[in-house]
Image (tube, rainbow, N blue to C red):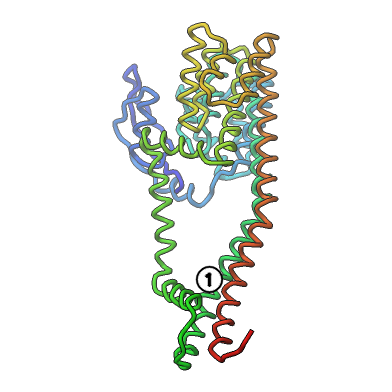
């Protein structure tokens, strides 16, 4: 579902009336975003034109990366934020992204920070993105953090593209195989039913099962996509409640292989964010808080909150990570070495690259093993159906194999 756009009127803490526009999935989420910015909403109204524009023209990750690189260049050149946005408006090719830049510029001119303006567009700017920009603005080091943010987005894009490229062939193979089996059951197998009925002989159990399966698919096959749709709907609904999301994230972490991939991916995000913040001079406690908020898995985020408390109490970061018994040994050992050598930021950045590489390698290995397995399974399925039905025909005609 695409995010909707809402126009709003709201009072700030000083009682000043503000007008603006934000994007959110629902009106309730729009209210939550405004209250999170210490604004009291008076009127919220969906902007139909903007909503239609959003549905028609989506903002890609490439658009966000181009915007970030452009903003990074201008901020490093000491160009003020409002002027930077005005310049970016003129050079942005994507119509949807240009409209968003105009919205950001309007928000900044009304006195909001860039992070606050970006926070109103959660479908475009992630929590990590907003938190890093906020830390940069508050610490006066936006010019130092934006290059790290741009590098992170580029690395994420490369990883995502590598995963997509690796998964294309197995997905095509799976779809082709499933369609072949379904076509056999729906169009080929039923033709044998009349033949068996005319012969009046007893049908072998295996052939009878396939005929029943074929009949069931023809009668109730439409329920399969409905069931899958409902399953996906309720799976997404689990994210709405903190308790259910915590259980869902815990379940995902417990899965073989997938749980490890999720853990390493989150460790890469955490380590890269924390390393960038520490390298820019952000104090450890604040850097931990920001880094914790960019972790998507709530189970890991909860443990990182405990790490933050332990560090605030005087414990070392490496020891605190080890104490949770949730993070890879490599992470807390490298962090401990970094603390002892005074190179924590650099080691965190390097460990993030290591985790990214591990994720890509594990996915490549998994796909390499998956391809022959799929071929064998689909060959058995198609061959099994064919042999079963032909054997039944031959046995009906008393043909001795």
The percent position of residue 9, horizontal first and vertical second, equals: 34, 31
Q: Is residue 226 above or below residue 209?
A: above
Depth check: give the residue in front, 328 or 158: 328
Which residue is at a point 64% across and 51% down the rendered structure image? 167
Q: Looking at the image, can residue 91 be seen?
A: no
Residue 25, quarter of the rendered image: top left
Quadrant placement of the C terminus: bottom right
Q: Determine which quarter of the picture holds residue 169.
A: bottom right
Residue sitting farthest toward the left = 42
Question: In the drawing, does residue 200 fall left or right of residue 152?
Answer: left
Q: Residue furthest front?
A: 400
Q: Is residue 99 above or below residue 401?
A: above
Q: Residue at x 60, y 66 (%)?
A: 177
Q: Can I make out residue 237 in this image?
A: yes
Give the residue at x 60% y 44%.
Answer: 94
> Foreground: 308 or 289?
308
User: Measuring 58% from the left and 36% from the top, which residue is drawn there?
Assistant: 260
Task: Report whether 23 appears left or right of 14.
Answer: right
Does residue 124 appear to the left or right of 159 in the view shown?
A: left
Instruction: State which quadrant residue 16 falls in.
Output: top left
Q: Is residue 108 above or below residue 337?
A: below
At mark 1, the secondary structure is helix
Q: Position of residue 137 (x, y in %)?
A: 55, 18
* Foreground pick, 396 / 328: 396
- Quick one: label 1, few (<14), some, or many (20+) residues within 10 Å? some
Residue placed most toward the observer, 215 or 347: 215
In percent of width and height, residue 385 lies at 57, 74
Q: Mark 1 — residue?
A: 182
Residue at the top extreme of this rendering? 314
Q: How many tags in the picture?
A: 1
In percent of width and height, residue 244 lies at 37, 37
């Amino acid at each position: 579902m695409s995010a909707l756009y809402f126009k709003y009127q709201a009072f700030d803490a000083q009682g000043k009336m503000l007008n603006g526009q934000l994007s959110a999935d629902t009106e309730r989420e729009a209210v939550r975003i405004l209250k999170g910015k210490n604004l009291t909403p008076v009127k919220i109204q969906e902007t139909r034109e903007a909503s239609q524009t959003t549905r028609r023209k989506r903002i890609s990750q490439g658009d966000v990366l181009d915007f970030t690189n452009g903003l990074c260049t201008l901020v490093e050149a000491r160009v003020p934020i409002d002027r930077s946005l005005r310049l970016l408006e003129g050079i942005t090719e994507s119509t949807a992204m240009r409209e968003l830049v105009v919205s950001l510029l309007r928000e900044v001119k009304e006195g909001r920070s860039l992070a606050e303006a970006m926070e109103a567009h959660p479908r475009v700017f992630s929590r990590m993105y907003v938190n890093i920009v906020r830390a940069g603005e508050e610490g006066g080091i936006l010019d130092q953090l934006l290059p790290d943010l741009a590098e992170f987005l580029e690395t994420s894009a490369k990883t995502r593209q590598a995963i997509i490229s690796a998964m294309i062939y197995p997905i095509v193979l799976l779809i082709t195989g499933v369609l072949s089996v379904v076509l056999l059951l729906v169009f080929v197998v039923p033709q044998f039913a009349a033949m068996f009925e005319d012969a009046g002989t007893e049908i072998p159990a295996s052939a009878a099962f396939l005929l029943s399966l074929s009949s069931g698919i023809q009668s109730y096959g439409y329920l399969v996509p409905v069931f899958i749709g409902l399953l996906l709907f309720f799976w997404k609904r689990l994210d709405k409640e903190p308790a259910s999301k915590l259980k869902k994230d815990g379940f995902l972490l417990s899965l073989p292989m997938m749980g490890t991939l999720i853990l390493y991916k989150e460790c890469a995000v955490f380590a890269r964010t924390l390393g960038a913040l520490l390298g820019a001079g952000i104090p450890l406690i604040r850097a931990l808080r920001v880094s914790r908020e960019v972790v998507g898995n709530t189970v890991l985020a909860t443990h990182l909150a405990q790490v933050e408390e332990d560090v605030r109490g005087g414990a070392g970061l490496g020891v605190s990570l080890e104490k949770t018994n949730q993070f890879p040994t490599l992470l807390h050992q490298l962090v401990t070495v970094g603390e002892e050598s005074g190179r924590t930021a650099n080691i965190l950045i390097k460990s993030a690259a290591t985790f990214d590489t591990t994720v890509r390698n594990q996915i490549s290995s998994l796909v390499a093993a998956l391809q022959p397995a799929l071929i064998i399974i689909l060959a058995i399925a198609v061959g099994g159906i064919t042999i079963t039905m032909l054997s039944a025909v031959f046995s009906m005609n008393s043909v001795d194999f």
